[in-house]
Image: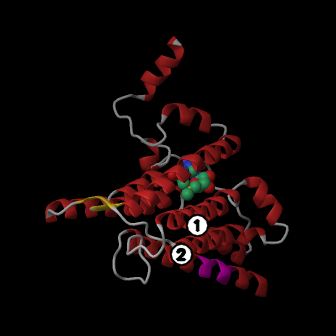
Amino acid sequence: MFKRISIFLYGLTSYAIFLATFLCLIAFVGNFPLLPASLDGVPRLLPLEALGIDILLLAMFAVQHSLMARPAFKRWWTRWVPVEAERSTYVLFSSLALLLLMVFWQPVGGVFWSAEHPLIRGLLYAVFASGWLLVLYSTFLINHFDLFGLRQVWLQLLGRPYRPLPFKTPGAYRIVRHPLYVGWFIAFWATPDMTMTHALFALLMTTYILSAIQLEERDLQVMHPEYADYRREVPMLAPRFGRSDKSLRNDETAA
Ligand SMILES: C[S@@+](CC[C@H](N)C(=O)[O-])C[C@H]1O[C@@H](n2cnc3c(N)ncnc32)[C@H](O)[C@@H]1O
């Protein structure tokens, strides 16, 4: 019983750290003066030095986030980490990698454009907020509590076996295959002040997410044979309206 309670508390702590990191990331990317660190600021290093550090920080996050998500890695490290705490540990490491990125991020200096009209600024902030909300909404569509390890630690506390969730395509997943990543793109690119630093962060994150999608989809096709059809019928990121499933099937028959 002691082990079960400890794993449950570990899962809760890891989730609390994730939530705090998520809120910090909103303030960091939006440059809201709530934290000691923000995406933009006065450069402290030479541009090339700052660029090198930022690329290194993002590469560290990318390697951690993608490597630890691979089924082979999970099989390997659950020899040491209790399988019920595997997802919570992944969430914890991802949060720590993001916190590290925020703390050591270096502004590079320079501005591409800055909106001055309050209406345009307000509009861009609204788009920015919609990106974060889309991220959060998408997590609830596929199961927020499973995605962040809470379901796993709760079931083990009750002594019930964990059953992986089935593949599903509710709500926004019927329009695009990766609504959560679309949310990230919106949150990272929508800003009233597009500085060089902001563009660099958005570009690096975009590049990483586009490559992470390839790995995620490879695993999804292995785990869920129906993913191949889903992949054919639903666009990856850009919604395509007006093409019904029926027309897609007709295209395939004609081909
Ligand atoms: C961070 S979420 C991102 C989900 C999706 N790529 C998106 O952008 O909305 C990654 C996890 O979601 C799972 N996943 C992706 N698509 C899914 C779906 N349609 N149904 C259930 N799980 C899904 C993957 O297996 C992975 O564990």
- Tell me: 55 left or right of 158: left
Q: Which mark is residue 104?
A: 2
**Which secondary structure lies at badge 2?**
helix
Q: Which residues are magenta?
A: 8-14
Q: Classify residue 36 by image quadrant.
A: bottom left
Question: Callout 2: few (<14), some (14-19), or many (20+) C-alpha neighbours within 10 Å?
Answer: some
Q: How many marks?
A: 2
Can residue 1 be seen by looking at this rendering? no
Q: Which mark is residue 132?
A: none
Q: Residue furthest right?
A: 79
The residue pinned by badge 1 equals 57
Q: Residue at x 41, y 63 (%)?
A: 197
Which amino acid, mark 2? Phe
Q: Residue furthest top?
A: 254
Nearer-the-camera pick, 42 or 8:
42
**Relative height, residue 201 to residue 231 (above, below):** below
Can residue 124 be seen by looking at this rendering? yes
The picture places residue 151, in percent across and down from the top left corner, at 62, 69
**Which secondary structure lies at badge 1?**
helix
The picture places residue 164, in percent across and down from the top left corner, at 67, 56
Mark pair 1, 2: CA separation:
8 Å
The picture places residue 94, in percent across and down from the top left corner, at 61, 68
Q: Residue at x 61, y 34 (%)?
A: 228
**Relative height, residue 135 to residue 172 (above, below):** below
- Tell me: 133 left or right of 161: left
**Callout 1–callout 2 Cβ contact below 8 Å:** yes
